Amino acid sequence: MNIAKNRPSRQAVLILSHGDGHIEIFGEKNIDIYLARIPHCPGSEALAEDVAELAIPRRYRDLYRADRLRATGSTRPLLPSVMARAVQAKEDIVVLNRLGADTPALEEVRKKAMVRKW
């Protein structure tokens, strides 16, 4: 029995979060999307989540479970310095992964560490 044939095709969804809090969600026309907001309630996040869950249409409530969570993120502004650090970290990981293959990569990491200024 081929299990792969029985699996539904995976749909791609793209969510863009702008620095001003505006969110854009992109996907195929056959995808239904509901965007819910959890109210800000310092000291009682559980209560805020309960309130938000009650506001979710019944059709979507079954999705609000830990095993259905597909990704997390933040709507806080993405600063250029944070983005630069992320790019640098990815480059460093590539170099470190090569360490097992060749020793000159270690010298490359040392050189980068000497010139990097955060």
Image: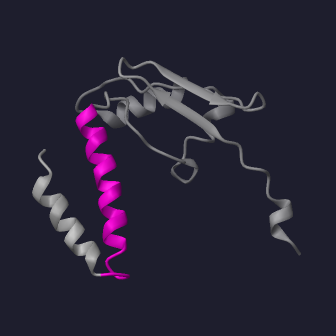
Q: Nearer the viewer, residue 79 or 75?
A: 79
Q: Is residue 97 placed above or below 5 in the rendered structure?
A: below
Query: Residue 9: horizontal and vertical position, in percent?
Result: 78, 50
The quadrant of the picture occupied by the N terminus is bottom right
Task: Say which residue appears at 27% left-offset and 31% top-offset.
Answer: 79
The quadrant of the picture occupied by the C terminus is top left
Q: Nearer the viewer, residue 103 or 14?
A: 103
Residue 48 lies left or right of residue 54; in this view the side is left
Query: Residue 23: horizontal and vertical position, in percent?
Result: 48, 22
Query: Residue 21: horizontal and vertical position, in percent?
Result: 39, 20
Task: Say which residue appears at 63% left-offset and 41% top-offset.
Answer: 62
Residue 108 lies left or right of residue 21; in this view the side is left
Q: Main secondary structure of the magenta part?
A: helix
State which quadrant residue 41 falls in.
top left
Residue 45 within the magenta-colored segment of the rendering: no
Span highlighted in magenta in the image: 80-102
Please, which residue is most extreme toward the right here?
1
Q: Nearer the viewer, residue 96 or 71?
A: 96
Give the colour scheme shown.
Answer: one colour
Q: Is residue 27 placed above or below 89 in the rendered structure?
A: above
Q: Is residue 24 placed above or below 118 in the rendered structure?
A: above
Residue 78 lies left or right of residue 29; in this view the side is left
Task: Say which residue appears at 35% left-offset and 37% top-offset.
Answer: 46
Task: Say which residue appears at 37% left-offset and 64% top-offset.
Answer: 94
Query: Residue 98: horizontal and vertical position, in percent?
Result: 36, 74
Residue 84 within the magenta-colored segment of the rendering: yes
